[in-house]
């Protein structure tokens, strides 16, 4: 039984550690987004995907342990497990750390989502300006000749 609980402690502690790593990646992502360095996001996204897969695996392991011991495989199950094992302070400290870090990760992810929306909005606006045909002032083509069927002068646009 003690070996079983130490394995559970390892799962819960690993889960907290991986959430902490995930937060570091979210902070890095936020920095890149804030500085407009979107080309650097590919590496961060790949690392986030790998960490998310590992976190899902750990969450499933924790859930299986709880189910195998007669508890729900969720937050409520952890609370019930804790009530039945008050001596397992280290496991519950790791779980509480996971909960706190998860809330922090959720907020960072929300902020990053807003930054991404802003980038998409600005990119869309820039494309609209570049592609706008009605208000383009086509004065001269590469050959130096007027590119419109009617002759327009800079004064006409003002």
Image (cartoon, grey):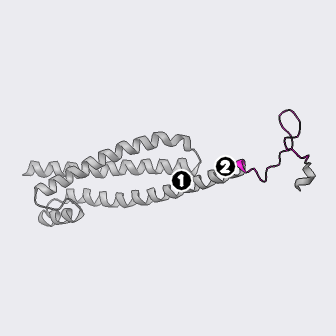
Q: Which residues are magenta?
A: 130-151
The secondary structure type at the circle numbered 2 is helix
At horizontal 30% and vertical 52% (from top left) the residue drawn is: 16
Q: Residue 99 location in percent, x, y?
A: 31, 60
Q: CA distance from mark 1 to mark 2?
A: 16 Å
* Tally of marks: 2
Q: Residue 146 location in percent, x, y?
A: 88, 40
Quickly name the residue at label 2.
127
Relative vertical location of residue 83 with respect to residue 46 in this rendering, above or below:
below
Residue 116 is tagged as 1
At horizontal 38% and vertical 49% (from top left) the residue drawn is: 22
Residue 52 lies in magenta, yes or no? no
Q: Residue 26 location in percent, x, y?
A: 44, 50
Residue 137 lies in magenta, yes or no? yes
At horizontal 44% and vertical 56% (from top left) the residue drawn is: 109
* Residue 87, quarter of the rendered image: bottom left
């Amino acid at each position: 039984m003690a070996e079983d609980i130490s394995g559970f402690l390892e799962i819960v502690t690993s889960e907290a550690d991986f959430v902490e790593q995930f937060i570091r990646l979210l902070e890095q992502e936020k920095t890149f987004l804030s500085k407009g360095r979107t080309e650097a996001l590919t590496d961060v996204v790949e690392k986030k995907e790998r960490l998310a897969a590992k976190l899902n695996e750990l969450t499933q392991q924790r859930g299986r342990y709880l189910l195998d011991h007669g508890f729900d495989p969720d937050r409520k199950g952890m609370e019930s497990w804790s009530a039945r094992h008050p001596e397992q302070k280290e496991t519950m400290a790791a779980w509480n750390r996971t909960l706190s870090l998860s809330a922090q990760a959720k907020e960072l992810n929300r902020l990053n989502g807003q930054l991404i929306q802003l980038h998409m909005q600005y990119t869309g606006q820039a494309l609209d300006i570049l592609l706008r045909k009605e208000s383009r002032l086509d004065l001269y083509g590469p050959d130096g000749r007027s590119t419109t069927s009617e002759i327009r002068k800079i004064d006409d646009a003002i």
